Amino acid sequence: MESQVNSQLNFQSPDRGPLIHPLSIGECVIPGNIFLAPMAGFTDAAFRAICLKKGAFFTYTEMVSAEACMRKSEKTLKLLERAESEKILGMQVFGSQPKQIAAAVREIIKYGPALIDLNCGCSIPKILKTGSGAHLLKNPKLIGEIIRAMNQETDVPVTLKIRSGWDTNTINYSEIGLIAQEAGASLITLHPRTRSERFSGHSDWDHITQLKDLLSIPVIGSGDLFTPEDVCAMLTRTGCDGVMIARGAIGNPFIFSEVRNACAGEISRVTITPEERLLCALEHLKKFIALKGEAKACTEMRKHFCAYTKGLSNSSVLRRQCVHASTESDYEKIVDEFIGKKND
Ligand SMILES: Cc1cc2nc3c(=O)[nH]c(=O)nc-3n(C[C@H](O)[C@H](O)[C@H](O)COP(=O)(O)O)c2cc1C
């Protein structure tokens, strides 16, 4: 995807201080404002650990179902377990009823979250059908009730992640932001697309600027952050308190260290070599195996591995090979062969 900004821009922002800074959310101090966004099917403990190592300051679990938490579903509660390197971790929940989500909060706090985030943005039909995710955008008052119910269960900061509205005729992020703030939300993240846009077109960063101007709680921006320049531009242009990187980190956790450099004023990019990319993929796989066992991890790793190979010369060969990889040594062989050939 094309970057939104010219890489020659100067991102220093003397009037607002450094672009990267700690964020205090209630009692919790997050050391920096560049987060890995929650992504179902991707942000498990293995990927989160890799992103933290590469420079992400904060990460979230994948979204967990409030209903499943309430039933103490083992599979769901496992998603709340953290990597050793995760001193602080955000946990995201989806649901549609205040009582149900409050009950889920009682389970989630046993896992020591730094904050609990309410998902109001998921646009998957299966989730929408239950009245959860972006469906909540249709009922801002209900969002307020849910935030209140969550806050009654815990002193852990309660936050929410929203889209701009249900569709282009019902853009209501400002109303939701004010209601959530009034209900005691400690932070809000905006992915400025509507539910009906899903991931199409471009996110409208002006919505982030407007929400930041309106609210006193921290506002985090999300949407179309694929390069360090994108991140610096969102921080500079919208004045948001921090950003979340989602698709831009898949297969490219290096983006976090690149962002740290770019926000510090280093315009020139350090090139990540193909070897570094693939060795990172293998490190990721090792963590994945420790988390899920070899068979499951090797299958699930394929989508990550393909992403790590994006942009490499002859990457189609690597992608074809990894479809058949079912053990750690299969992956190692693929990488060794690729690196060996390159060095021939
Ligand atoms: C595969 C995938 C899974 C996602 N899962 C979640 C989720 O569980 N919770 C959530 O709030 N947002 C989720 N999102 C949305 C992202 O957090 C983010 O807001 C969105 O992708 C826009 O950022 P980007 O343009 O940097 O990808 C998901 C996005 C993707 C691509």
Image (cartoon, rainbow, N blue to C red):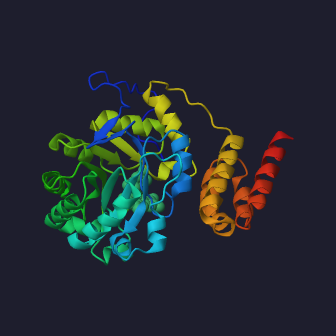
Q: How many marks?
A: 0
Q: Residue at x 23, y 61 (%)?
A: 153
Horizontal side of 295 relative to 45 (left or right) equals right
Residue 261 lies, in percent from the top left, at 49, 29
Horizontal side of 286 relative to 138 (left or right) equals right
Name the image quarter holding residue 273: top right
Name the image quarter holding residue 5: top left
Horizontal side of 162 relative to 77 (left or right) equals left
Residue 314 lies, in percent from the top left, at 73, 51
Q: Quadrant of ligand 1?
A: bottom left
Q: Residue at x 47, y 32 (%)?
A: 260
User: Which residue is outermost to the top?
Assistant: 14
Residue 275 appears in the figure? yes
Q: Residue at x 20, y 55 (%)?
A: 173
Is 273 or 198 nearer to us in this picture?
Answer: 273
Look at the picture and state if 13 lies above or below 87.
above
User: Which residue is outermost to the right?
Assistant: 344
Identify the image quadrant of the C terminus. Answer: top right
Residue 276 lies, in percent from the top left, at 68, 41
Residue 120 lies, in percent from the top left, at 29, 62
Horizontal side of 87 relative to 313 (left or right) equals left
Look at the picture and state if 204 lies above or below 101.
above
Residue 94 appears in the figure? no
Is 90 or 35 nearer to us in this picture?
Answer: 90
Look at the picture and state if 328 lies above or below 296.
above
Q: Residue at x 36, y 62 (%)?
A: 108
Look at the picture and state if 129 lies above or below 231.
below
User: Which residue is outermost to the front?
Assistant: 110
